[in-house]
Image (cartoon, grey):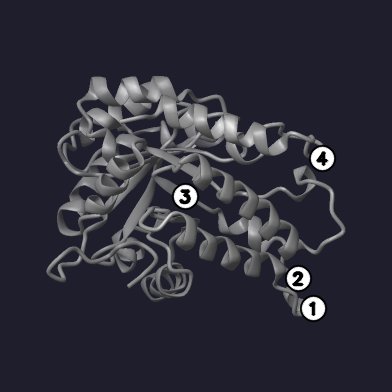
């Protein structure tokens, strides 16, 4: 078994779609808590990288557990941890800190899925290696993937009980430079669609063969989110929705647009990272940093309650 409860009674493997619905029901919300550490905003300490991150997140998780606060997913971005390594000097404190954090999630939040945000995607053999990295080595429940190289770069990630979030319409400012370009869609060669809708059509086709394939759709472009949510409604396609908080997206607006589109909200995960783990954004952590984190977590859980 992995870190989530992978087996239902009777030994049947639980699909990723079922894992999402189950975790949303148990947590009572559809929040995804991003775990992207920035060393400059942590409480001051003479300890090393691994020890500081271990201590910081253990305080957060312990307090969340004490107050009965649980999101419906967690999402560490692997780049934040790898950048703290120094491999040429045989120092892997960042990666080892991620190991510690994943172990803590096992302890404090069993059954809550972990999405490894690594945005992989390569030729088939290389994608297979990245899938082993994410699922077999890190023990993630889901991973983020780029679709640019096509199905043979995506399908190696399609494990039976795992999730694959394919970049669809992302939350960054430059997303529109490519993703909103008009293209002739393969389904209807007479119609022009924004590229993000053509990608959505492709994801829906792939998901028929590989359930658990989903989409990354940013909260910072609400009209595009509505378009995509309407198309995915009734198709059991999970959505990871970043951009809430620091990037300007609104959880309340996301919830409304998902409902208006007829999309099953239990399959969505609304992500906030820095807005939860260090809401003061810049400078060393204030004396009441843990209270500020709890207040931000509590507020988002309420806004994205199901």
* Residue 187 place in picture, x, y as percent: 17, 41
Name which of mark 3 and mark 4 comes first in the sequence.
3
Is residue 267 left or right of 49 when viewed as pictured?
left
Label disc, if present, on residue 89 of the rendered structure: 1
Residue placed under numbered mark 2 in the picture: 86
Name which of mark 1 and mark 4 comes first in the sequence.
1
Q: Is residue 199 visible?
A: no
Q: Distance between the residues labelled 3 and 4?
A: 24 Å
Q: Which residue is drawn at 24% across and 39% down?
A: 185
Q: Badges 1 and 2: C-beta atoms under 8 Å apart?
A: yes
In the current view of this chain or complex, which residue is farthest to the front? Answer: 66
Q: How crowded is mark 2: few (under 14 residues within 10 Å), some or many (20 or more)?
A: few
Name which of mark 1 and mark 3 comes first in the sequence.
3
Q: Badges 1 and 4: C-beta atoms under 8 Å apart?
A: no
Name which of mark 2 and mark 3 comes first in the sequence.
3
Q: Badges 3 and 4: C-beta atoms under 8 Å apart?
A: no
Q: Which residue is drawn at 78% across and 39% down?
A: 285
Label disc, if present, on residue 170 of the rendered structure: none
Is residue 25 left or right of 269 when viewed as pictured?
left
Callout 3 secondary element? strand
Q: Distance between the residues labelled 1 and 3?
A: 30 Å
Q: Residues within 10 Å of mark 4 (few under 14, many from 20)?
A: some
Residue placed under numbered mark 3 in the picture: 74
Name which of mark 2 and mark 4 comes first in the sequence.
2
């Amino acid at each position: 078994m992995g870190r989530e409860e992978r087996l239902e009674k009777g030994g049947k493997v639980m699909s990723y779609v079922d894992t999402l619905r189950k975790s949303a029901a148990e947590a009572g919300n559809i929040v995804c808590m991003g775990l992207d550490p920035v060393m400059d905003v942590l409480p001051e300490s003479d300890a090393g990288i691994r020890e500081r991150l271990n201590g910081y997140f253990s305080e957060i998780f312990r307090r969340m557990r004490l107050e009965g606060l649980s999101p419906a997913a967690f999402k560490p971005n692997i780049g934040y941890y790898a950048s703290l390594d120094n491999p040429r000097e045989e120092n892997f404190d960042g990666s080892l800190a991620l190991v510690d954090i994943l172990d803590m999630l096992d302890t404090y939040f069993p059954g809550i899925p972990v999405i490894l945000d690594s945005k992989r995607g390569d030729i088939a053999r290389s994608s297979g290696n990245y899938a082993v990295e994410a699922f077999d080595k890190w023990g993630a429940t889901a991973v983020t993937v780029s679709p640019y190289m096509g199905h043979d770069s995506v399908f190696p990630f399609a494990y039976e009980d795992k999730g694959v979030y394919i970049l669809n319409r992302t939350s960054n400012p430059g997303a529109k430079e490519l993703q909103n370009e008009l293209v002739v869609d393969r389904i209807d060669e007479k119609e022009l669609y924004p590229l993000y809708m053509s990608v959505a059509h492709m994801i829906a086709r792939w998901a028929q063969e590989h359930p658990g394939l989903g989409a990354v759709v940013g909260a910072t472009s609400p009209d595009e989110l509505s378009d995509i949510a309407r198309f995915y409604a009734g198709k059991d396609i999970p959505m990871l929705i970043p951009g809430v908080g620091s990037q300007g997206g609104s959880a309340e607006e996301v919830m409304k647009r998902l409902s208006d589109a007829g999309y099953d909200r239990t399959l969505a995960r609304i992500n906030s990272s820095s807005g939860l783990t260090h809401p003061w954004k810049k400078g060393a952590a204030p004396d009441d940093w843990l209270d500020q984190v709890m207040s931000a977590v509590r507020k988002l859980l309420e806004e994205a309650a199901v």
